[in-house]
Amino acid sequence: MKNTDILVKLLRADIENKAILEVACGAADFSVSASAYSDSVYCIDLDARRLNSSLKEKLHFQIMDASKMDYADDTFDTIILYNAFFHIQSQWIEIERECRRVLKAGGVIYVVGTWKLDVNIIIDIFGGEAKWQDQFLIAAIRK
Ligand SMILES: C[S@@+](CC[C@H](N)C(=O)[O-])C[C@H]1O[C@@H](n2cnc3c(N)ncnc32)[C@H](O)[C@@H]1O
């Protein structure tokens, strides 16, 4: 089973039939896994080069800066950054503000890392609030 399939199963209560946004999606592996449980999976990145073009029909992919999103306030139930935190760390204040803006009340932002670089910076920023579940270090920010 792919890592992202395992993660989606762990987070299933916040995925199934929810409006999902994956931020800094890269190849969008998490979004593909999540789309087995929700038709409303949006994913954004600055760069479309890693995205498999055949996925673009199934997922709602857009080139968009996560620090300046085009989405309306209160649009998503669940937002995820998967193995992307190291790459967006210098913009985290702006990106977190935007994620909170587009998240519905009662929604959740998951920052998840498996790679050493991501894990180290997640521990630096979230400390004990980040918890290991299986091979995933997960920080959950609720609105
Ligand atoms: C490690 S890669 C993606 C990892 C991805 N989640 C995966 O599993 O394939 C980090 C990504 O962050 C994207 N990125 C960096 N800054 C961004 C921003 N401000 N808005 C959106 N995407 C951004 C990069 O383009 C890159 O694709």
Image: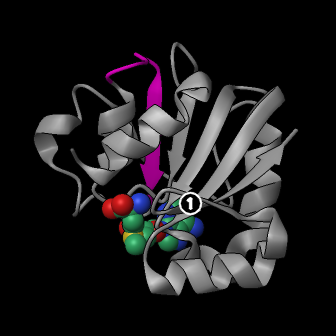
Where does residue 50 sit, x and y in percent of width and height?
A: 22, 62
Kindly tell me whether residue 91 is visible in this rendering.
yes
Where does residue 128 sit, x and y in percent of width and height?
A: 82, 71
Q: Secondary structure at mark 1?
A: strand
Q: Residue furthest left?
A: 54
**Start and end of the magenta stretch?**
36-45
Rendered residue at 50%/86% (across/down) = 117
Rendered residue at 52%/27% (across/down) = 12
Kindly tell me whether residue 73 is visible in this rendering.
no
Q: Is residue 81 left or right of residue 109?
A: left
Looking at the rendering, the quadrant in which ligand 1 lies is: bottom left
Viewer-nearest residue: 22 or 9: 9
* Quarter of the image that includes the C terminus: top right
* Quarter of the image that includes the N terminus: top left
Q: Residue furthest front?
A: 134
- Residue type (three-letter) at the residue carrying disc 1: Val
Report the residue marked by disc 1.
112
Q: Is residue 108 left or right of residue 43?
A: right
Rendered residue at 71%/61% (across/down) = 95
Question: Is residue 44 shown above or below 32?
Answer: below
Question: Is residue 19 shown above or below 34?
Answer: above
Let me know if residue 38 is in the magenta part: yes
Is the CB atom of the residue marked by disc 1 within 8 angstroms of ligand 1's nearest atom?
Answer: no
Where does residue 21 sit, x and y in percent of width and height?
A: 55, 38
Q: Is residue 28 left or right of residue 114?
A: left
Q: Quadrant of residue 138?
A: bottom right
Rendered residue at 70%/26% (across/down) = 75
Q: Is residue 122 left or right of residue 43?
A: right
Viewer-nearest residue: 24 or 11: 11
Question: Which color scheme did the rendering employ for the protein?
Answer: one colour
Where does residue 90 sit, x and y in percent of width and height?
A: 68, 83
Viewer-nearest residue: 46 or 89: 89
